[in-house]
Protein backbone atom coordinates (compact mmCIF):
# COMPACT_ATOMS: atom_id res chain seq x y z
CA UNK A 1 0.00 0.00 0.00
CA UNK A 2 2.74 2.48 0.94
CA UNK A 3 4.70 1.60 -2.18
CA UNK A 4 1.66 2.39 -4.32
CA UNK A 5 1.19 5.79 -2.66
CA UNK A 6 4.91 6.58 -2.80
CA UNK A 7 5.17 5.71 -6.49
CA UNK A 8 2.03 7.67 -7.28
CA UNK A 9 3.25 10.75 -5.40
CA UNK A 10 6.62 10.64 -7.17
CA UNK A 11 4.92 11.20 -10.52
CA UNK A 12 3.31 14.51 -9.47
CA UNK A 13 5.36 17.56 -10.40
CA UNK A 14 5.98 20.12 -7.65
CA UNK A 15 4.65 17.97 -4.80
CA UNK A 16 7.84 18.36 -2.74
CA UNK A 17 6.72 21.85 -1.65
CA UNK A 18 3.72 20.57 0.36
CA UNK A 19 5.71 18.94 3.20
CA UNK A 20 7.76 22.13 3.50
CA UNK A 21 4.61 24.24 3.70
CA UNK A 22 3.08 21.87 6.27
CA UNK A 23 6.19 21.95 8.45
CA UNK A 24 6.34 25.74 8.24
CA UNK A 25 2.69 26.13 9.28
CA UNK A 26 3.16 23.63 12.12
CA UNK A 27 6.32 25.39 13.34
CA UNK A 28 4.84 28.90 13.13
CA UNK A 29 1.69 27.84 14.98
CA UNK A 30 3.62 26.43 17.92
CA UNK A 31 6.07 29.34 18.00
CA UNK A 32 3.09 31.71 18.06
CA UNK A 33 1.39 29.68 20.77
CA UNK A 34 4.57 29.63 22.86
CA UNK A 35 4.96 33.39 22.42
CA UNK A 36 1.31 34.01 23.42
CA UNK A 37 1.60 31.87 26.55
CA UNK A 38 4.93 33.37 27.60
CA UNK A 39 3.71 36.98 27.20
CA UNK A 40 0.24 36.55 28.70
CA UNK A 41 -0.44 37.72 32.23
CA UNK A 42 -0.40 35.19 35.04
CA UNK A 43 -3.79 36.35 36.35
CA UNK A 44 -5.40 35.63 32.97
CA UNK A 45 -3.86 32.16 32.79
CA UNK A 46 -5.04 31.41 36.33
CA UNK A 47 -8.57 32.61 35.55
CA UNK A 48 -8.80 30.58 32.34
CA UNK A 49 -7.35 27.46 33.98
CA UNK A 50 -10.02 27.60 36.71
CA UNK A 51 -12.95 27.90 34.29
CA UNK A 52 -13.68 24.14 34.08
CA UNK A 53 -13.74 23.89 37.87
CA UNK A 54 -15.86 26.99 38.45
CA UNK A 55 -19.31 25.55 37.75
CA UNK A 56 -21.03 26.79 40.90
CA UNK A 57 -22.52 29.83 39.14
CA UNK A 58 -23.85 27.79 36.22
CA UNK A 59 -25.14 24.84 38.23
CA UNK A 60 -28.98 24.84 37.94
CA UNK A 61 -29.54 22.41 40.85
Image (tube, rainbow, N blue to C red):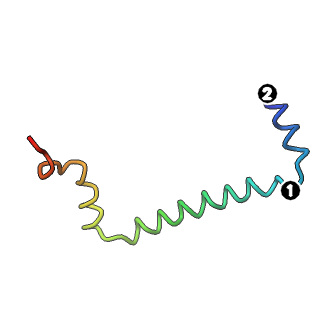
Residue under label 1:
14
**Left or right relative to 53: residue 4:** right
Residue at position x 60%, y 57% from top?
A: 26
The N terminus sits in image quarter = top right
Give the vertical position of 47 relative to 6 (above or below).
Answer: below
Give the vertical position of 3 relative to 58 (above or below).
Answer: above
Residue 32, percent from left and from top:
51, 66
**Left or right relative to 47: residue 2:** right
Residue at position x 40%, y 65% from top?
A: 37
**Residue in the foreground of this view, choosing between 53 and 61:** 61
First reached walking from the N terminus: tag 1 or tag 2: 2
**Left or right relative to 57: residue 22:** right
Residue at position x 15%, y 50% from top?
A: 58
Pointer 1 with pointer 2, Cβ within 8 A: no
Label 1, label 2: how many angstroms apart (C-alpha)? 22 Å
The C terminus sits in image quarter = top left
**Residue in the foreground of this view, choosing between 37 and 8:** 8
Residue 41, percent from left and from top:
31, 71
Pointer 1 local density, CA inside 10 Å: few below 14, some 14–19, many at least 20 = few
- Circle 1 SS class: loop
Residue 9: quarter of image: top right
User: Which mark, residue 24?
Assistant: none
Residue under label 2:
1
Residue 46, percent from left and from top:
25, 61
Residue 8, percent from left and from top:
87, 39
- Circle 2 SS class: loop
Give the vertical position of 19 relative to 33 (above or below).
Answer: above
Residue 6: quarter of image: top right
Which residue lies most toward the top here? 1
Amino acid sequence: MLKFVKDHMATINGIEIYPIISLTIFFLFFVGLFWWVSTSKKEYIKQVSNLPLDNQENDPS
